[in-house]
Amino acid sequence: MITFLISLVALVLGYMIYGRVVERVFGPDDRETAAIRKADGVDYIVLPGWRIFMIQFLNIAGTGPIFGAIMGMWFGPSAYLWIVFGCIFGGAVHDYISGMLSLRNDGQGLAELTGRYLGSAARKALILFTMLMMVLVGAFFVYCPAIILSGIWGERMMWVFIIFAYYIATTMMPIDKVIGRVYPLFALSMLFMVVALGIVLVLKHPVLPEVWDGLGNWGAERLGLKQPLFPALFVTIACGAVSGFHATQSPMMARCMKAERQGRAVFYGAMITEGLVALVWATISSYFFFYGGWREVCPAEVVAKFEGQSALSLIQFFDAPTVVNIVCASWLGTFGSILALLGIVAAPITTGGSSFRAARLILSETFGWKQTSVRSRLLLSLPVFAVGIALLAWQIGNPSGFGTVWQYVAWGTQVMAAITLWMCSVYLRQEGKCFWMTLLPAMFMTMVVTDFFFTSPTILGLDYWLSLVLAAVVTALATIRFALSKSFNADK
């Protein structure tokens, strides 16, 4: 519990101290924002600051900082360090600089910003990559919530149609009509759940593994996992530490902010808040698996079933959604079960809806189409919906196959994080500002994603030590390129 409390304080101090340092380096000013200058009643609308924060938090969070943190803690107490240092010095900096660049450039998306600072080739590649990611996320977050909801009431396909209809509404409607009204309520429920669980943790004060008990791969030593801690931990915990998915969502809120000085609370603050969510659920996971907490919260017949079995069978049965359901119901009662349902169902649905909307905005920037008319929004949304329906149909027919695809999506978010951090580093260097605050995380994330690419059995599956050497070479080459070139953009 000591590590948990220290980490909690560290995240808060990170926002108060390092967040101000990053803000001072970027230098927000009093210029008029696009929400005022380009107000169109659809995507460019001034919203209250607290509402923007809530929407940004839910957009970037979803179930990521819950499920990812639960599975990430299987690797042991080293997950604490990744959540704290990754969030303060990586993820929050990534979100703030990229979000502020979008805000300062009329709400431009990640692909357009990448083209501005890394060149037209990078822009074209990222348009395709981010579009694929957005539609994959949207499709994935239709069927999974439908399965859960059908177990409570109704038919599975009925819920598929309802959820997809909701996606159409969030993609097509002005941002203040659906997203601006619904998302803050879901975000508030998630925050209440995390605060309540954090209080229960402190009151129970269980004896938990601390960072000084060892930073090795506890998953391999105690749970029978075969994945190496590096790079698997840093891909498993993305939301809650560093995630490139956030850079695809921030432009939506950049188009709704009335002042640049809101940026630290909206971008850096939402990421720190997500880190707090990940911290609480990582600690609960530690309690559940390493302290034996599963025995305290599960019915007697379940305990008897797994008593004496291997630890690997334990984590295979108690997957992340199951842990959320059991812990919330046990610690928070009926109300906790409702909150767990919101976390498992509402959060992915809202994330999926935002992903489809982000895909529409990417297409509108690519083709230069204004989005003030329903017709123009529909023309750009139809191909997005068509691809989403095709992927959804494939997922329904191949439920296990999509799980494999999702591993690539998790890796893809970290690839986007590395690209975004390199882009931010180029911007800061061009402006004569401290680029080290994004360059070091960019180098680290490049090492993570390239090593995962080389060593993961679902991709190349090379020898572990060979993959480390190759990843180090790729990272070194990217760093040399940055050092020798004033700008990646050959068009400048």
Image (spheres, rainbow, N blue to C red):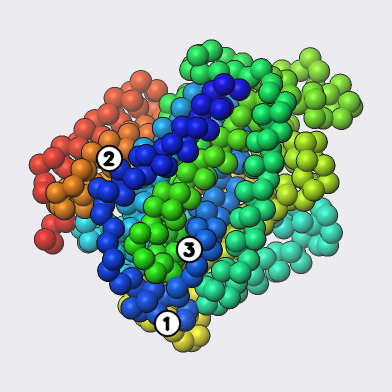
Above or below, 75 relative to 397: above
Element assignment for label 3 = helix
Give the residue displayed 53% in from the left and 12% down from the top.
213
Quadrant in which residue 204 is drawn: top right
> Circle 3: is it few (<14), some (14-19), or many (20+) Cα within 10 Å?
some
Mark carried by residue 379: none
Q: Earlier in the sequence, mark 3 or mark 2?
A: 3
Q: Tell me which residue sits at (56%, 27%) in the image.
A: 4
* Residue highlighted by disc 1: 40
Q: What residue type is labelled 3?
A: Gly
Question: Which quarter shows the C terminus?
Answer: bottom left
The disc placed on residue 49 is 3
Q: Which amino acid does label 1 sit on?
A: Asp
Find residue 354 and report its horizontal and vertical position in percent: 53, 63
- Residue 136 x, y percent position in the rendering: 52, 57
Foreground: 381 or 262?
262
Label disc, if present, on residue 437 of the rendered structure: 2
Q: Position of residue 399 (x, y in %)?
A: 66, 50
Q: Looking at the image, is mark 1 or mark 2 earlier in the sequence?
A: 1
Left or right: residue 234 versus residue 331 is left
Determine the secondary structure under disc 2. Answer: helix
Q: Nearer the viewer, mark 3 or mark 2?
A: 3
- Whether residue 176 is visible here, answered yes or no, is yes
Residue at left offset 37%, top offset 39%: 17
Could one spot residue 397 in this view of the protein? no
Where 374 falls versus 411 (above or below)? Answer: below
Report the residue at 50% width, 14% height from top: 212
Q: Is 366 on the left or on the right of 157, as rendered? A: left
Note whether 123 is above or below 404 in the view shown: below
Give the Cα separation between the discs numbered 3 and 1: 19 Å
Disc 1 to disc 2, C-alpha distance: 35 Å
